[in-house]
Amino acid sequence: MNFDFTEEQTMIKDSVSRFVRDEYDFDTRTKIVASEEGISREFWSMFAELGWLSVPFAEEYGGFGGSVEDIAAVMEEMGKGIVVEPYASTVVVFGGLLAASDNESLKAEVIPSIIDGSCMGSFASTEAQSRYEIADVATTATACDGGYKINGEKTVVANGGTANKFIVTARTNGEQFDREGVSLFMVDADAPGVEVKSYKMMDGQSAATVTFKDVVVSEDKLLNAAGEAMNLIDQVMPQILMGLSAEALGIMATLNTATVEYTKVRQQFDTPISSFQVLQHRMVDTFMACEQTKSMLYRGLCQAGEDNRHELLKTVHALKATVSRFGKLVGEEAIQIHGGIGMTDELNIGHYVKRLMMINVSFGDGDFHQKKFNQLAYSA
Amino acid sequence: MDIKFSAEDLAFRDEVRDFFASEYKEVAGIESSDYKAAIISWQKKLHAKGWVAPGWPTEYGGTDWTVTQKFIYETERGLAGIPDVVPFGLKMVAPVIYTFGNEEQKARFLPRILSSEDWWCQGYSEPGAGSDLAALSTTADYAGDNYIVNGRKIWTTFAQYADWIFCLVRTSKGMRKQQGISFLLIDMKTPGITVKPIVSIDGKHSLNEVLFEDVLVPTENLIGEQDKGWTYAKALLAHERTGMAEVADSTRMLDALKQRASVEVNGGKSMIDDPVFQMRLSDIEMELMALEYTELRVFASMAAGGMPGPESSLLKIKGTEITQAIQELQLQLAAYYGGALPGDVDAQQLGHDYAFEARGKYMYGRAATIYGGSNEVQRNVIAKAVLGL
């Protein structure tokens, strides 16, 4: 039994932690968010130099050869600084899907450009009607001379505005809701027929509506066999959910610490409000919520190294539902206990809460995942 | 990060499973007149095997198990549905005796606790001293070879069976209330002791009031130094709480609940397929899955040489809340049938054989968040020791 990160993992965790502490203070982040592009290219290059962009990739592509544990270690620290650079969407999601692809030439071409920082990527799957069902795909890819022709519109594509490449879900056969018949294509953001309209999200990150009009892609841009996208997505999803949950854990811990510290200095009725038992007990509840979330994440990380897919899936659905429930508790209590100052845009608290809210709705909210859990646990 | 056990640990787990499977016979419920004899008989079997006191140092008859093995043992016990040993002697007073008692006391009491010859009960709470235990007012006046004890203890579980009671009593006044308290061992047969039953809201009798009127207790029954009893009692509280997560017991109860929900129907449809019931079930199951790992994390840190700290309060709070949530959902499942009292109707006739149990467990289960330091007191502990408030 062992719940410690390895020495290597601890090193990378510490290096992200130091960056957040020394170079990514809240003012710096605010300036980055307000800038034209909304991210810092300078920091992104630094991430590349420090090797953070190489974490999940195999050594043969120049990667670090890390596991989901390494991703979680990095993401937790990123959460503590609510880092807006598109690490999750480029490295964990886009990179994760690519790493699981069996298209070796595509991997050899793209992975090194992720690692060296020159390629930012995004997973373009959500459509106006699809909500959390990734298999609900109306975008089509029809066979044509030279490969496939993609038509359709993807909405709220995370960091779509800064991405050089998209991994796009498009239907090559079947009906709108069929799991069969969805395919994954690598598409350049500047390919003819691709139109990207970027907008700000409440968590300081950006998203885009990406339109595909007769976009021609060759067959060798398929990530895996045509029509079998869902298999690959299912395979990578636990890693994505655990990565985002680790980020949420970092945010929750930061909110709890900030709230506890604030109550020790805020005086009302001639005494620090930390002396009030009603507040103490609520802060104990948010502390326990954070510990339970951490335990659920660790459960997932342990099971990721085992050979029981059913149990791992139960755990990651439960984890995402837990992050939703306890994230909401921690976020709302942080604002409430801070009082009026917690309502201000100037204070960092609200910004941490808004990132938690966006994590909650990324790849399925709490209810969505709890229903998935119920199917696995109670439907024989 | 992994929860793999070593080959030795897995072999140990098999040994525990085999022993439980071959030796354990179901022990009658605490309401039964057979309970005392049945639980003693089981404890004697454990003693013969050398397993009745895993937490004790080996020199007094404990096991040389590692922290991991102790954890495995507890988990297997819970999963098998085997009741824990009665804690008052083996888990509460014995650690005080072997840690703070003198050689005569160790020789006199420990072997009889191990062999279940003596049944112990706990004399801590008083009518005016519940969560604020240090406010206790039962007095022990020093009079040469004896203390003269006067006062009332309450919520004393199984005092009706007990040969001995360990008490916190006030030996000095006029200082901080935590000072001036002493730890006394008292023979229940001593003249002046009266035990009065208290029937609890489940309709059963396990609780009692114990009255002391000019009870003479030999000074040799004092543990450690006079007026230092609070320190001795407190030193062992964290140990008591780590055992309160009861993850394995809750896991077994939840499995039984799911099984029952697959049999129970409403409108001809199985309750386990009801989407709302499923949400209530998974609300609990997910918290329990997390708690299992919280407990493992605490055990891993203990195995690495750490001590159970304030996080044991977290285990107590979450563990009891989850147990209660299961009991609550089980009673909900028992529906209207769960209201029937045994006596004139039997469980088979009701058609829902767990209905009596569901009601009893729910009602008595309310105690779990009150005893062992109420959950509000545990929150105070975390607020102070972990959050620094």
Image (cartoon, coloured by chain):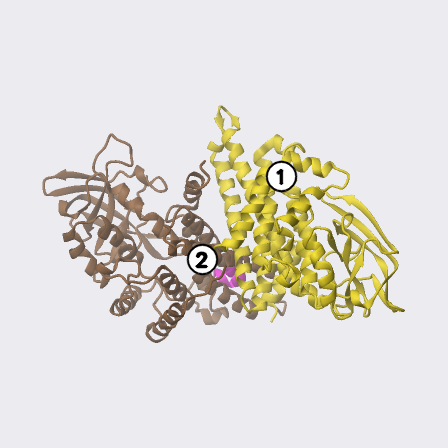
Chain colours: A yellow, B brown
Q: Quadrant of residue A134?
A: bottom right
Start-end of magenta stretch: B329-340
Q: Is residue B41 above or below residue A259?
A: below
Number of other residues with Cα within 10 Å of mark 1, as a class: few under 14, some 14 to 19, many 20 or more: some
What subunit carries mark 2? B
Query: Could you tell me which residue is drawn at 53 percent across and 53 percent down?
Result: A9
Would you say B241 lies left or right of A194 here?
left
Q: Look at label 1 and name its amino acid.
A: Tyr
Residue B265 forms part of the magenta stretch: no
Query: Could you tell me which residue is drawn at 60 percent across and 61 percent down?
Result: B278
The residue carrying mark 1 is A24
Q: Nearer the viewer, residue B135 or B48?
A: B48
Q: Quadrant of residue A182?
A: bottom right
Cα distance in 3D space between marks 1 and 2: 34 Å
Residue positioned most to the left: B144
Residue A366: % across, % down: 64, 54
